[in-house]
Amino acid sequence: MSDAILEIKNVSKYFGKAKVVDNLSFKVKAGEILGFLGPNGAGKTTTIKMILGLLSIDEGTITINGYDVKKDFEKAMEYIGGIVENPDLYGYMTAVENLKLYAKLRGIEYGEVYKILEKVGLEKSMNQKISKFSLGMKQRAGLALSLLHSPKILILDEPTNGLDPVGIKDLRDILKSLAKNNNIAVLVSSHILSEMELMCDRVVVINEGKFIKAQEIGEKSESADIEKKYEIKTKAVEKAQSVLKEKLNKEGIVIDGKLYLNIKPSEVSTVVKTFVYEDIDIEGVNECENTLENIFFDVTREGKGNE
């Protein structure tokens, strides 16, 4: 069996005539935190709802721990835990009462409740009513509820919304611990790119319902054959962009009045020499850091990418 706990293969979803998810494919492996990124309206929440069985799958397949969501729904759902929007908890009950109620319904021993509350850092607050919890504590209680039946994968849609920096860090640390120590796969969607960079092992970017790019966080290459992103510092931005296209067949991108170019390191000297020959003053050529923010904006701006 593959180490992929979740596999999405050629999945599409239509709302009327509009194709909101378009032939989407990717995997999430055991012990991995995968960031699921894309601009608003990219199809992230629709995809997550299909994974959780809240929306039907029009085309393609979704399997969880080897079980097809369409053909063996109940079995597939046994291995999944998720929080979409707000955790479903009773405010008038304590954290431990909420979890014990769920445990009773699922035939889970009460001893597991205390273990899970400790894992999410709520052992000292378990007898406090949920209505008195901070937003961060409610998220952790919701996470505890999702973990109680020992899922193989967690699906989290914008789990850090509204949390303060302490709450965000607490949630990040818990998820990283669960992935590393319990070999749980985690699929997390968020618009906070800096947080995703700290939390995730890998990201998948989608746009307009289509797969754009998958990349390891912090992935870098020392090979001279791999293109990197450079900022060309010049006051003659438009002329430089034109020269790149006409003389070198290269597409420079202008963002906020700055010129950026994806080229191999070995090509930098050729670009500089061409600019000098064309009487374009160059103040500097800087390699851009390979941050998640750069990856995200590059691929969504281009509207296309590769695996």
Image (tube, rainbow, N blue to C red):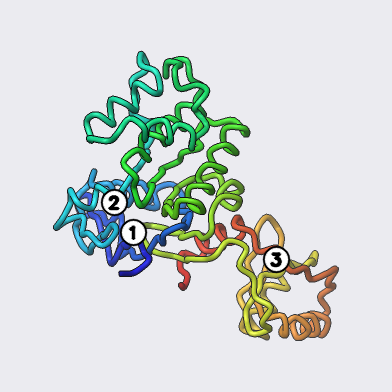
- Looking at the image, which residue is at 83% across and 69% down? 284
Q: How far apart are marks 1 and 2 (CA)?
A: 9 Å
Q: Going from the N terminus, do you reach mark 2 or mark 3 first?
A: 2
Q: Quadrant of the N terminus?
A: bottom left
Question: Which of the 4 image quarters holds residue 113?
Answer: top left
Q: Which amino acid does label 1 sit on?
A: Leu
Q: Position of residue 124 (x, y in %)?
A: 52, 23
For label 3, the residue is: 259
Frontmost residue, 191 versus 128: 128
From the viewer's perspective, tell me whether residue 265 is left or right of residue 84. Answer: right
Q: Which of marks 1 and 3 is in front?
A: 1
From the viewer's perspective, tell me whether residue 212 is left or right of residue 197. Answer: left
Would you say the residues marked 1 and 2 are in contact, meaning their CB atoms lie under 8 Å apart? yes
Q: Which element carries disc 3, helix, strand or loop?
A: strand
- Compared to residue 302, the image places residue 276 above or below, namely below
The residue most toward the left is 71
- Residue 6 — which label? 1
Q: What residue type is labelled 3?
A: Leu
Q: Which element carries disc 1, helix, strand or loop?
A: strand
Frontmost residue, 126 versus 279: 126
Question: Which of the 4 image quarters holds residue 116?
Answer: top left
Q: What residue type is labelled 2?
A: Ile
- Compared to residue 102, the image places residue 224 above or below, namely below
